[in-house]
Image (cartoon, helix red, strand yellow):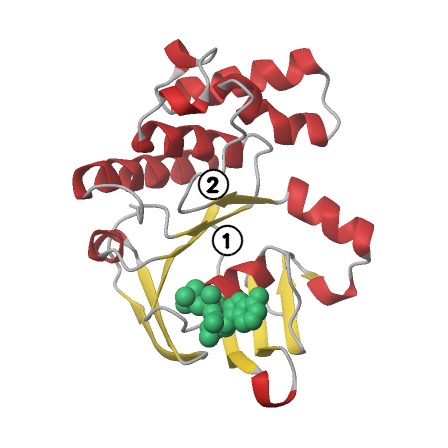
Amino acid sequence: MSGSYIVGKGLDRTYGEGEGATVALRGVDLEVARGELVALVGPSGSGKSTLLHLLGGMDFADSGSLEVGGHELKRLDDAEAARYRRERVGFVFQFFNLVPTLTALDNVALPARLRGLSVTDARARAARLLEEVGLDQRSRDFPDTFSGGQQQRVAIARALVNEPELLLADEPTGALDRGTGAEIMSLLLELVQEHGTTLIVATHDEAVVDVAARVIHIEDGRVMRDERLGASRS
Ligand code: ADP
């Protein structure tokens, strides 16, 4: 077994069958060390989200192997895969995906509740995370009263509430103006450094690419280039 935190080998993923089939990933190899910050870049439709879904245990490769933290994801049964998604992985999406009928505090507390914490413990954790993202004064407010950047802060707090080892972000700045996107990225970087979380961000955003220590270029389902820039994180 390799010492890397993530080891993917020969990952293939095709959606559909026959004439309508779309090949999303073709023989992707990937190794990521624990605590690394990786930007995944490439044109729309190149396979970035598909790769994030495989890493998050939301979807499985048709062939190849993918180990995260020493566990081969395709060997997990349904219950184990659900636990993996809930406890080891956090997700941040382009459009925040907050629950509109829950307050900011209860949005952040939700994954901790799903993990089995009591309401009191889950809310206490959520309150700490909202403080870390600078929104402790807004904890009782509902998502529709927040700006896009504030909603993404709540979503980041939610993604971190179960202290995941791995944070996956799919175009997290894609729905934000440039300045707000830059603020969100620096907050993400600061938090993953504090929490020791491995971060993989799929993005078009040059500002994200500029701060990433490593940039993996994907085109047409293949890794075309893997650059280690030696920037940031220190
Ligand atoms: P990216 O995130 O780089 O935009 P995706 O991983 O979303 O790329 O998509 C890769 C390819 O797979 C694209 O051609 C896309 O249309 C296709 N695809 C993605 N998800 C599905 C799906 N659920 N069903 C069918 N095709 C899909």
Quadrant position of residue 102 = top right
The reply to whether residue 3 is visible in this rendering is: no
77 is higher (above) or lower (below) than 122: below
Question: Which quadrant, please, contains the C terminus?
Answer: top left
Quadrant position of residue 176 = top left
Q: Nearer the viewer, residue 167 or 33?
A: 167
- Residue 174 lies left or right of residue 139; in this view the side is left
128 is higher (above) or lower (below) than 79: above
Which residue corresponds to the image point at 47% horizontal and 35% vertical from the top-left? Answer: 195
Q: Amino acid at mark 1?
A: Arg
Q: Are marks 1 and 2 in contact (CB under 8 Å)?
A: yes
Q: Residue 196: which disc?
A: 2
Marks 1 and 2, how far apart at CA = 8 Å
Q: Residue 215: which disc?
A: none
- Residue 18 lies left or right of residue 158; in this view the side is right
Quadrant position of residue 175 = top left
Q: Secondary structure at mark 1?
A: loop
152 is higher (above) or lower (below) than 46: above
Q: At which x and y percent is residue 157?
A: 47, 29
Q: At which x and y percent is residue 110?
A: 62, 27
Q: Which residue is mark 1?
A: 34
The reply to whether residue 234 is visible in this rendering is: yes
Which residue corresponds to the image point at 21% horizontal and 41% vertical from the top-left? Answer: 177
Which residue corresponds to the image point at 66% horizontal and 11% vertical from the top-left? Answer: 120
